[in-house]
Structures are given as C-alpha cells and as structure tokens.
Image (cartoon, grey):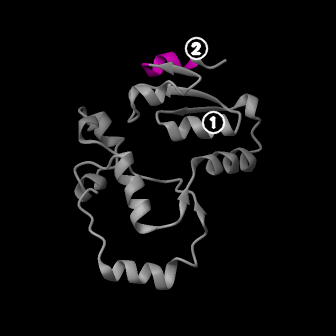
Amino acid sequence: MFGYVMSDYDKKVYAEQLADFLPDKMIDAHAHIWLKEFDPVTAEEQKACVSWTRMVAEDCSIEDLMQTYTDMFPGKKMRKTELLSYVLGKLGAEKDDSVLVGDTINDFEAARVNAVFSVGVSWGYGKEAELKEADVIVHCARELRAAVP
C-alpha cells in the first residue's frame, strides 16, 4: 500500500469495536484517487484540484484504495453496483435516461447490473482491457455528447 502500515492495535480495535458494527456491504461515494502523472500543469487546472491529497502520498491508485478497504475492513465488501442503484432510486432517474461515465471494470459492472448505458473514458485510471467492457469508448471530452444515444 502507499505507505500506510496497519498496526496490531489497529487490527485489535477493528476486531473488538468495528467489525460487528459495520455492515457487510459498504459504499464509499467519496474517494480520493490520484496519480502524480495526472497533476495539473496550468494555474487554472491547479485551482480545480484538491491539493491536500499529495501531502499524504505521491500516488493513490484505485489498487491502493481497494487494498486499503481490504486491510481496514476485512470481510466487508465495497460495491459500486449498490451505489449506482441507490443514486438512481434517490434521484428518481430513469435508467434509459442515465449514463455512467467511467474508466474501470467496477464502473462498467455497475452500469451493466443496473441496465445503464456506459461510456469508457481513455484518460482515466482504467486499463485498455477494462474499457472494452463499456458500451462505448471515448478519447476526449468533446466526444462524450456524440457517444451517448
């Protein structure tokens, strides 16, 4: 993982105080994932970015995040499929009028399970093989409007 070491005390607190309290399935709707290679280069881009994350670690990939969940919440599941279902229901959104724009296999699985059209973006963190799971792939933001049916 990206520099975090879970101590025996951390494991003890989790086992004794949190394991039974936390639900078996959880959704993290707000996660900070970043790679140094995507750092903003212009002043305008810098204003739009959260910078505190770089003080914690140089990189925090999706793999780092998932490993953090595995380490911190053993036996619990983090599922994007349930998050999308909840958001659609909360908003009263029609699936035919909804689009999921993403870049990982988890994004496209959530879209497929929820019968939502998916657009894979090649500028994200996902690998090329993951993007093939999307309904359509775009390579720049200008292509998004034309990609959506």
Q: Position of residue 14 (x, y in %)?
A: 44, 78
Which residue, given by chain and number where applicable, does mark 1 sit on? Answer: 111
Q: Secondary structure at mark 2?
A: helix
Sequence-wise, the earlier of marks 2 and 1 is 1
Could you classify mark 1 by the number of other residues whose Cα lies within 10 Å: few (under 14), some (14-19), or many (20 or more)?
A: many
Q: Which mark is residue 61?
A: none
Determine the residue positioned at 55% across, 59% down: 77
Q: Nearer the viewer, mark 2 or mark 1?
A: 1
Is residue 138 depicted above or below 31 in this figure?
A: above
Residue nearest the viewer, comparing 117 with 38: 117
Q: Is residue 17 magenta?
A: no
Relative to 149, residue 119 above or below: below
**For residue 146, which numbered disc appears in the image?**
2
Q: Identify the residue at image location x=26%, y=59%.
A: 56
Identified by mark 2, the residue type is: Ala
The answer to which image quadrant residue 116 occupies is: top right
Report the magenta residues as a range: 139-146
Of residues 12 and 55, the one drawn nearer to the viewer in this rendering: 12
